[in-house]
Amino acid sequence: MRAENTEVSRTVRGASRPTAGAGTGAGRRRLAALGGERQGAARRRVAGRVSPLIALCLLVLLLFALCAIFAGPLAPHDPTAQDLRARLRPPLGVAGGARAHPLGTDPLGRDILSRLLYGARVSLAIGFAGALIGLAIGTLCGLLSGFLRGPIDEAIMFLVDVFLALPFLVLALTAIAVFGNGLTVLILLAGFSGWAGYTRLARGQVLGVRERQYVLAARALGASPPRLLLRHILPNIVAPLIVLATFELTSVILLEASLSFLGLGIRPPTPSWGSMLGEGRTYLHTAWWIGVFPGLALMALTTAISLLGDWLRDVLDPTLRG
């Protein structure tokens, strides 16, 4: 009887114990799936906790985008039309203001509101185009530098160090003096201004990802270098690059405003927030609205983009999730 009980207990334990290969593989797959679900749920929870401040920033950015797209129908006047009889007219609500010019007029009688709407088109076009160009160039250089290493890595990082050592404003002034200050030149300058930051960030991310197990496994299975870069490495480093792009966007917008403030941006009479600030600095005591309104618009846009960048960093960075 004792032998039979022992045999039965062994049989029960053997039946309840899974095979080593099948149980381990299935368990790992279940754990991986559970980890992915938890990570996705955590990301959705963070993304869902949109504070009123972030919602306001999204609303401000959407408002500026709509103003830039529909500047023609929204503008009450031609932004370049001059009316010397209505010059330096104050905004509505101030003594002497009129409904025809809600934000007042400049020294040439041009409507401030119309110029702000068209200036948003210039600032956003140069900002987004420049940020995308810098992101593309910097990501490509960082991928090649971190993945190939050797002489290519040394050459690219040498160019990055040289670029960061030179004052970019001097380079921009030289390029404008040689090629002019057209819209295409300004967009290329804006894109070229931030490529070094993207390159250093992408290179650092690639150096950490290229030794991960899934990359080594794909390489062992015979995946080509382009497939490794585009399929296995790039998707895993894109999150910090997107966050950096939001901060670089504000830098590009401020760069265009600075060049226009110095008279080296978009050629007159095309309106630009920087050029409006430059025109209004001499009238701050007599006609404050000329420089205050474009300054407020520029501050609101860059602040909204910066706060959205902080929010994206919290959403996309797993180390910042509680």
Image (cartoon, grey):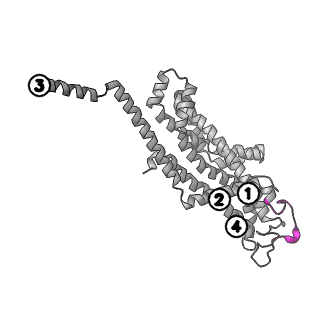
Task: State yes or no: residue 79 in magenta.
Answer: yes
Residue 17 lies left or right of residue 149; in this view the side is: left
Marks 4/2: CA–CA distance? 18 Å
Disc on the earlier residue, 3 or 4: 3
Q: Secondary structure at mark 4?
A: helix
Q: Nearer the viewer, mark 3 or mark 4?
A: 3
Disc on the earlier residue, 4 or 1: 1
Disc on the earlier residue, 2 or 1: 2
Residue at image mark 1: 67
The residue most toward the left is 2
Magenta residues, as a range?
Answer: 74-90
Instruction: Name the quarter where the N terminus is drawn.
Output: top left
Where's residue 303, x and y in %?
60, 58
Marks 2/1: CA–CA distance? 11 Å
Residue at image mark 2: 60
Crowd band around label 1 with a 10 angstrom C-alpha radius: few (<14), some (14–19), many (20+): many
Residue at image mark 4: 292
Q: Nearer the viewer, mark 4 or mark 2?
A: 2
Where's residue 127, x and y in %?
68, 49
Marks 3/1: CA–CA distance? 90 Å
Marks 3/2: CA–CA distance? 83 Å
Residue at image mark 3: 1
